[in-house]
Image (spheres, rainbow, N blue to C red):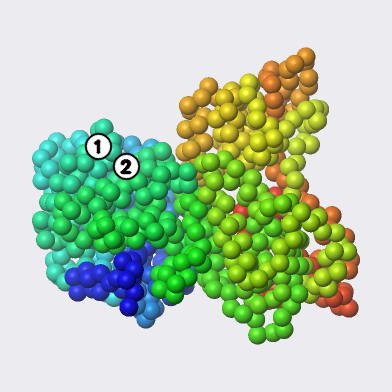
Amino acid sequence: MTRDPLLQPFQLKHLTLRNRLMSTAHEPAYSEDGLPTDRYRLYHLEKAKGGIAMTMTAGSALVSEDSPAAFGNLHAYRDEIVPHLKRIADDCHEYGTAVMIQITHLGRRTNWNKADWLPVLAPSPVREPAHRAFPKEAEDWDLDRIAEDYATAAERMQAAGLDGIELEAYGHLLDGFWSPATNFREDEHNGSLDNRLRFTRRVLDSIRDRVGADFIVGLRLVADEQWDKGISKDEGIEICRRLVGTGQVDFLNVIRGHIDSDAALSNVIPVQGMPASPHLDFAGEVRSETRFPVFHAARIADVATARHAVAEGKLDMVGMTRAHIADPHIALKLSQGREHDIRPCVGATYCLDRIYEGHEALCIHNAATGRELTMPQVISPTEGPRKRIAVVGAGPAGLEAARVAAARGHHVHVFEAAPDAGGQVRLAAQSRRRSELIGIVDWRLAQLEAAGVQISFNTYAEAADVLAEEPDFVFIATGGLPNTEILEEGNALVHSSWDVLSGDLSATGRVLVFDDNGGHPGMQAAEMLIEKGAEVEIVTPERFFAPEIGGLNHVAYAKALHQSASRITINMRLIGVSRNGNELVATLGSDYGERTETRAVDHVVVEHGTLPMDELYFDLKPQSRNLGAVDYKALIRGEDAFPARNPDAGFTLVRIGDAVASRNIHASIYDGLRFAKDL
Ligand SMILES: Cc1cc2nc3c(=O)[nH]c(=O)nc-3n(C[C@H](O)[C@H](O)[C@H](O)COP(=O)(O)O)c2cc1C
Ligand code: SF4
């Protein structure tokens, strides 16, 4: 019998949760037309297989049709959802995992210009900056129908066999009434705390009328908005007490902060470089004040902190949400004494930023998550012969290919020209704020070591070295080099963003950063330069700056820019650079006209992606069995993707990651996984 506090069961009413780990509500935007179909189901099922005690499905499943989806939210207002949820519940129950769902009316936290183009509404017409919605003030008939919608949605969830529901009450409609920042009404819904809780109580009453006393109903609620004009800590704890006092609620899932802007949201859902578990003690306070079951999640990314949270009585259930996106098998690995095998969540928040950009949630370094239909979370050993695999390059693509090939049971040899593994990930991890990225590399190195993979560092592999291995399969994961040769004049006068990230250029003075990529490298270079004291101007030909960086990742860069005398210039592109004495003169043009401008600066940094290091690939290509070709149609169908164009040759060749074209970490990892998983 294990003594690990995290693995002890928790009794929630009639429901026994098998351990203390849960995944809190998060909409991964895997829904199809608002319904949780197979992709959604398999995503949750994987966590059930991985031993999690409870998975809170959806994130903000919509109770009312007039509350349009902000990011692929489930339609809890439709009867058709019931069989889909039932399948998820049945499948997860088979593995011993409880399944609940978060339901809500988004209030002002969505857009009016979609779905049925109905007005967004809120207690008062206070704009929500994040969604740019100007809500109408909810009228009596709105509240009548929405209370009814909550009840009907709850009934559907019960009919689907779910173990319970959670009402979202932070930044949405319900808590909009509680907060002095968003409630300016002059009716019975404002004034005293009881007045502000009136609508929430009505919703709870109408839900209980339909689902009865036994069905589990919880609240994910803000208990301190950390906002001078919002709900204070004392008032928030009093709200918790009063809602517990209704006897209608079975658990509190505690939130601290407000979420109406990216900057505010990043304090509720902290990203890498921000403090870990910042609200854990506060959640513990709510627990001791209310003596009620308390759940909580906010960057509790490692099991040691989670264990501490339970052992010290701060939480009953620990939300490790992104941690389970990175590794859905945490509880299983813990129970098997394989804590070291847990793939770490590095806080990159690529997952969440993607849904706000209209994409589905994907983990920066687990390419199987959300792709359980086609990609394995657990690599099973091959039943075929043990092959000899050569991997050239130990960046993210090469490390992932080597990890997966080794897990298949093959003999793997990795060649790396540098003294260390990691490639561009190691470079990005140079700044303290993004240093956690190195977990992507370190976890894979540990997996390779455990599998007995040979890695030859400081080895610039040539074709002869690879052929000497007599390989069956060769991965070229040699990455790329910065492409700065893009100017009409003065290419030799500029630095690349890598020069800054690596520390080779430690510039102060006036620095112009031309970002013609839109992702992290240019912004990270700018941030590092600002930290060194440089006066930075970011120039971009885009309509927005850094459009490939999502809202939460944007916050740290925006803070750095804001705290300095730096400038951002959009709609301009760097044309050339010339020398004028000790200075450089940068000439800027625009896609929108002929006029040019100049800047006198001390340094110019250019970020324009990378060009592939592909010499070795082209050397090996004529000798390979597939002549380097990949049958993309077969790859997409999950079939053998390597045509035998040169059938007598001994090895198959594939190029992955930035050795193909300039992309990102996820693309590299996905390449490594999908080309190695069937070897
Ligand atoms: C992709 C994604 C979508 C999310 N959507 C919701 C949501 O709809 N409702 C909600 O209450 N929280 C949502 N969250 C927040 C999580 O429930 C959780 O509070 C947050 O990720 C912090 O916990 P963690 O550090 O364990 O990941 C979302 C998180 C992610 C990563
Ligand atoms: S993308 Fe980053 S934050 Fe999200 S789960 Fe993966 S490692 Fe964690």
Task: List the residue tagged with mark 1.
Answer: 230
Question: Ligand 1 near label 1 (Cβ, under 8 Å)?
Answer: no
Q: Position of residue 485 (x, y in %)?
A: 79, 36
Residue situated in front as seen by the camera: 329 or 81: 329
**Residue 152 left/right relative to 202:** right
Residue depicted at 18% across the width and 47% down the height = 237
Residue denoted by label 2: 258
**Residue 317, picture quadrant:** bottom left
Q: Residue furthest top?
A: 581
Against 656, is 575 above or below? above
Circles 1, 2 touching at the beta carbon (< 8 Å): yes
What amino acid does circle 1 point to? Gly
Residue 598: which quarter of the image? top right
Q: Is residue 516 visible?
A: no
Q: Is residue 356 left or right of residue 474?
A: left
Q: Residues within 10 Å of mark 2 (few under 14, many from 20)?
A: many
Q: Is residue 372 visible?
A: yes
**Residue drawn at point x = 41 percent, y = 44 percent:** 275
The vertical placement of 365 against 180, above or below, is below
Q: Residue at x 70, y 43 (%)?
A: 609
Front-lying residue, 402 or 540: 402
Q: Secondary structure at mark 2?
A: loop
* Number of numbered discs visible in the structure rendering: 2
Relative placement, left or right, of 368 versus 64 is right
Q: Position of residue 110 (x, y in %)?
A: 37, 47
Locate the C terminus by quadrant.
Answer: bottom right
Q: Is residue 639 above or below residue 498?
A: below
- Give the quadrant of the N terminus: bottom left
